Amino acid sequence: PGCHNPQSWKFENGHKMSVDDLMKVITDDEFSNVSFSGGDPFYQVEGFTALARRIKAETNKTIWCWTGFTIEEIHTLTFSWTARSSRH
């Protein structure tokens, strides 16, 4: 498990975008679907989950996610995030 090429990316690269900004980009192209990859999406589990839920609720697009995490690790990440969210 893990990234097959971790030396090819850094957390500092790229730029921040809100879920609303990303939804605009996603919905502007009616023909494309959505793939999450590179700089593993689950390192940003809160934002990734919020975005994936909006895509599912507001579009008919197919969502793919490429990750280095195992399903057991994802369940732990999402459980941890859900537990933290419900306390606020």
Image (spheres, rainbow, N blue to C red):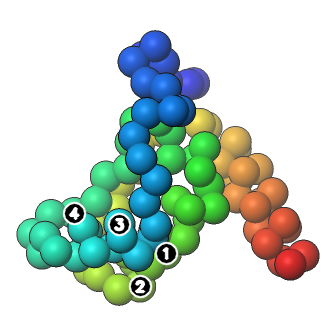
- Tell whether label 2 touches label 4 (CB within 8 Å): no
Residue sitting at x 39%, y 40%:
14
Say if 67 sits above or below 84 in the image: above
- Tell whether label 2 touches label 1 (CB within 8 Å): yes
Residue 33 percent across, percent down from the top left: 22, 63
Q: Which residue is mark 3?
A: 22
Asked if residue 63 lies left or right of residue 16, the reply is left
SS state under label 3: helix
- Tell whether label 4 touches label 3 (CB within 8 Å): no
Q: Which residue is mark 2?
A: 57
Mark 4: give few (<14), some (14-19) or many (20+) Cα within 10 Å: some
Mark 2: give few (<14), some (14-19) or many (20+) Cα within 10 Å: few
Q: Which residue is mark 4?
A: 33
Q: Which residue is mark 1?
A: 53
- Tell whether label 1 touches label 3 (CB within 8 Å): no
In front: label 3 or label 1:
3
Residue 17 percent across, percent down from the top left: 43, 60
Q: Residue furthest bottom?
A: 58
Residue 69 percent across, percent down from the top left: 59, 36
